[in-house]
Amino acid sequence: MAATRRYHGAMRAAIYYVLAYVLLDWVSYLHPVLPLAVTPWTPAPGLGLAFLLLAGLRQWPWLLIAALSAELLLRDVPLTLPWVVAASSILALTYAGLAWALGQWVRIDIRLRSLRDLTWLIGGSLSAALLAGLAYVGLYTVAGVTAAGDFPTNVLRFWVGNSVGLLVTVPLLLVWAGRYPARLAPSREVWLQAGSLMLSLWVIFGIPFTEEFKFFYLLYLPMVWIATRHGIVGVTLALAATQLGLIGALQWGGHHDTTVLEFQLLMLGLSVTGLFLGMTVTVRQLAEERLHRREAELNQALRLAAAGEMAQALAHELNQPLSALANYSRASRAMLAAPEHGVLLAETLEKIERESTRAGQVVRRLREFFRGGGLRLERVGVAALVEEGISPARRRAERLGADIRIVLDEALPELRADRVQIGMVLHNLVANALDAIGTEPETARRVDIVVWRQDGGLVRFCVSDSGPGIAAEMRARLFESFATSKPEGMGLGLSISRTLVEAHGGALWLEATQPTQFCFNLPVDTDSGTAAADSAASQPQP
Ligand code: ADP
């Protein structure tokens, strides 16, 4: 069943391909050198080559069928069928040979990821077009259809038409058929670039100069702009648009055959330059992206390693007191069975107490270590605190096109706080908010920070975002260590933030889920506030 469906799918693709080939050949059948079918722009073989590269070499008979159909339907060659079959076979076999050489012999990546792939594609196309030209024109010369004296010019025409056709069509189809890693999204710049291409064409053809060729170089300007900004993805589109514009202008201008050929030679130069420049830019962009990905992976690995290290240190430090505790408890139970061991029992219980205190100290010491040695309280203004906390996230917010709005109550008192730690808390909350809004449409991305004074000597900070809300399976576990819904998350941000705020004598909680809002309180710098923070600093809670 699935095999039949696949077969039908392949057949349909092949038939569409033959139709597209004949149609493209018909559309581009301009300025032919009669009775030869040599035109200055021959994109159909490019379609054939791309089809073989994408659909597999086994499809080569379709190339023959397509070439033969085009030859019989569109041309008026005064020869018998065997000659026409031979001419079509030359085209089909040469380009099937090129597809074989590229795919099997030099094994290029058909998604065009490197300069090597592109160099082979361009070199192979130019050579195959020349070979096909020699054989095709040679055949018609031998058949007596064209004069032997015209052989070199006819081969040149064939070569130029086929080469431009291949270089404009094949990279375009290869890059746009699959999911190319780099993409091109419509933006104001893209429209400006398209406009500058049209402007260049208009200057070349719209203003009546005697020598239009002199102004062809103008097309290099938008092409270089497009290549440097969008790499090969942009260049392939720009070349196709330029070629269409060029052919359209030449056609409507009623230009002489030789002029068209000369323009196509210039177009060949533009295509090769544009493609190489675009590929160079794309290769750099891809390498940069790879580097970024590796950096992120490395960061993740380092964080995991740090967490692993911490877990190991904890296990090592706690193992001894815990097994001592277990032994003493066992011994105590045995002594309870024999009441005459009262003194021993008291001693053993004392040991249990000692060991559990030691285990508690280990945990506290480790926590102090990771927290950077306790609180460093100082008087600090709320505005400065908020600014310091969110400044590291500003660039990311800009990249996301998100608006971070800060609303501070008038006349907020100063706080006594560790600015680094509260900065970390704010940063964690804002980073989570930015993660959350990343999935929303750009116009709706917003993060709001509101701070106001409350009764009871407290200042409340709230961070809300326009994201989709908290995932249902996360709601109950938000503040647990290592609870995360993100592939690269550590799930420590909220639990650490809560510990840090509590160490200041404050509290942190989830205020609302739609929209998401996290809030925390900090005591103001009055005597009671200071006392709360100080006692929290000297006696961190486990
Ligand atoms: P991490 O960000 O590394 O996952 P956190 O402890 O900071 O760790 O957050 C835990 C989880 O809480 C996140 O994975 C996410 O599912 C959820 N969360 C936190 N903040 C938000 C928010 N603003 N919007 C939606 N979900 C959130």
Image (tube, rainbow, N blue to C red):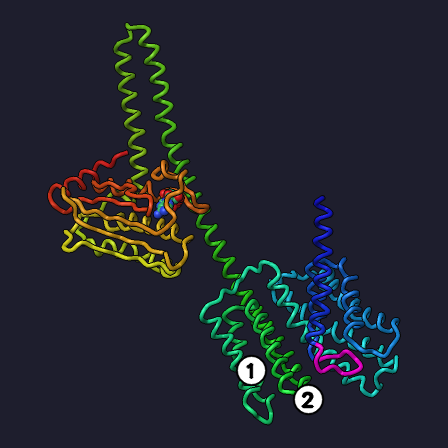
Q: Nearer the viewer, residue 356 or 2?
A: 2
Query: Where residue 518 appears, x then y in whole percent?
Result: 29, 45
Q: Disc 2 marks which amino acid?
A: His
Residue 154 got which mark? none
Magenta-highlighted residues: 29-39
Name the residue tied to disc 2.
Answer: 256
User: From the Cβ of disc 2, is ligand 1 less than 8 Å away?
Assistant: no
Tell me, yes or no, whether the highlighted magenta stretch contains residue 38.
yes
Residue on which the image places disc 1: 201
Quadrant (top left/top right/bottom left/bottom right) for the C terminus: top left
Q: Is residue 469 above or below residue 41?
A: above
| Rendered position, 135 above or below 328 | below
Marks 1 and 2, how far apart at CA: 18 Å
Q: Secondary structure at mark 2?
A: loop
What residue do we see at 70% from left, 53% from top?
9
**Quarter location, residue 142:** bottom right
Residue 286 as seen in the image, left or right of residue 140: left
Residue 123 in view of the camera = no
Q: Is residue 499 above or below residue 240?
A: above
Please tell me which residue is depicted at 21% across the width and 56% down the height of the picture: 383
**Can you give x and y, in whole percent of width and height, for residue 489 in the image?**
42, 45
Residue at the far left: name it.
527
